[in-house]
Image (cartoon, helix red, strand yellow):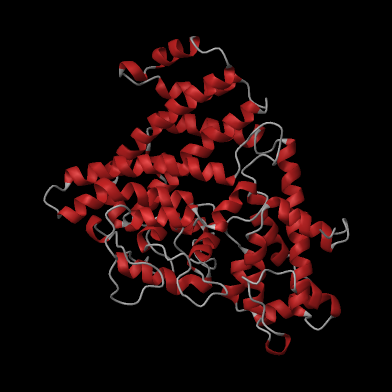
Amino acid sequence: MNWASLYTTRRTGDKEGKQAIYDPVRSSFLQDYDRIIFSSAFRRLQNKTQVFPLPGAIFVHNRLTHSLEVASVGRSLGKAAGEMIAAKYVNETDQFKEFYRHDLSAVIASACLAHDIGNPPFGHSGEDAIRSFFTGLEGEMKEKIHGALNPKQLKDFELFEGNSNALRTLTNSFNETEPGGYKLTYTTLAALVKYPCTSIEGFNKDTKLIATKKSGFFDSEIDTYRQIAGALEIERKEGYENVYARHPFVYLTEAADDICYRVIDMEDAHRLRIVSFETFKEMFLPFFDTETADYNTRQYLERKLENINDDNQKVQYIRARWIGLMIDKLAKAFMANEEALLSGTLEQDLLSCLSDTDNVLIKKINKYSVKYIYNYRAVVEIEIAGYNVIGGLLKEFIHAVLYPKETRSVKIVKLVSGQFPITPAEDKDIYRDIQSLVDFIAGMTDLYALDLYRKITGITIPVIG
């Protein structure tokens, strides 16, 4: 790979040879950002759990606020890295320098904005709930589904992945005739796919490839990703059918997310009085111990904190300074690993490319978060609720498409949004129908999923009006 071939204005759904229309106000990549932020799928993230249950008396992050903050950090990372690339390759074309100085930041911000758009309700437990439903199939339902789906299709459901679903959400037209979905640029989509492989070849750490840690596209989107990879000259990994090298921009998208969730989850926990200010301080101030610039030393930060009265304000100050420090470090780490990035051989995230001292501190944050935040009682309770609600919805709707002539099935199917087509009983396509149902359920907000589950199971009775 080389920097000059890693971007294009070509979009999904474009006819061969179509050229982007020049817009002096909004580049093709800024248009990507706008298309995502104005989409209904993005707006629904405002009622999807990030970590802590929603809503509550104390504000905590949801998927939407998290994505906006990741996009902000991603924009800065893209700007920093782009400036360094443009400065290094002074003999490249004006178009090259224009892209890296001004457009890479929009690409990374757009990819960050959409990075959680494929996640189902109830946090990561939503993904687990979908996987558990399909791996736990029994009896006649199992026979029907296993008989209708090939191994690759079945694995997409048994190893359902929000990252793969993000690409599907953004590129699939569902019940519309116009192809290409949101019609985003190949560049933005490539910067989004963290694990460029299928489900059947993914979820395999034995390969030592970062690409196969999870999956990045379903069997139904293979052709779409092949087109993206071909246009951007992303190489397929030797010895694999559908495993590709990571696009270098993905590392920046991933780094922005890694920065945000580590500090923001801790900040939310502090607001909920799960984490004390002293603990927060102990987790993040040591990153400044080795800094030498006057405004960035630990001593300088300590003096600033003495002049702040409210602990929440102190946490916000540390959070802001830590994010700024990490943006600088990770942008430099990106360029320090340029050769491995372009050869597709960097098999670790950018955070892992930092110094041993920084990695010890990051592991300390990870360990503390798992023990005291991600296993906090309210977090576990909403995860259990997610299993029951999503599992219950899948059971009801999938039964309806497997037995379409039952009176109750006819009524259940009518509840599926027209955006997600269900094939008629006389011409049943079980794979397509299950995909539509998973699309429908994964796109729900927490509250809508809970409300619908209660109504169709009779826990609550619908009210007209």
Query: Quick one: quadrant of the C terminus?
Result: bottom right
Q: Residue farthest to the left?
A: 91
Q: Position of residue 83 (x, y in %)?
A: 24, 42
Query: Quick one: quadrant of the N terminus?
Result: bottom left
Q: Position of residue 195 (x, y in %)?
A: 46, 58
Left or right of residue 112: residue 449? right
Q: Is residue 240 visible?
A: no
> Above or below — where is 116 with respect to 285?
below
Quarter-wise, where is residue 231 in the image? Answer: bottom left
> Above or below — where is 364 with respect to 303?
below
Q: Position of residue 76 (x, y in %)?
A: 36, 39
Q: Residue farthest to the front?
A: 465
Out of 44 and 152, give the one closest to the viewer. Answer: 44
Out of 187 and 209, give the one closest to the viewer. Answer: 187
Left or right of residue 360: residue 108? left
Identify the residue shown where x is 45% and y is 71%.
180
> Above or below — where is 360 with respect to 53?
above
Q: Position of residue 185 (x, y in %)?
A: 37, 62
Quarter-wise, where is residue 320 in the image? Answer: top left
Label total for image: 0
Left or right of residue 451: residue 94? left
Identify the residue shown where x is 60% and y is 34%.
369
Out of 105 and 90, give the one closest to the viewer. Answer: 105
Q: Is residue 377 visible?
A: yes
Identify the residue shown where x is 48% and y is 14%.
305
Left or right of residue 274: residue 249? left
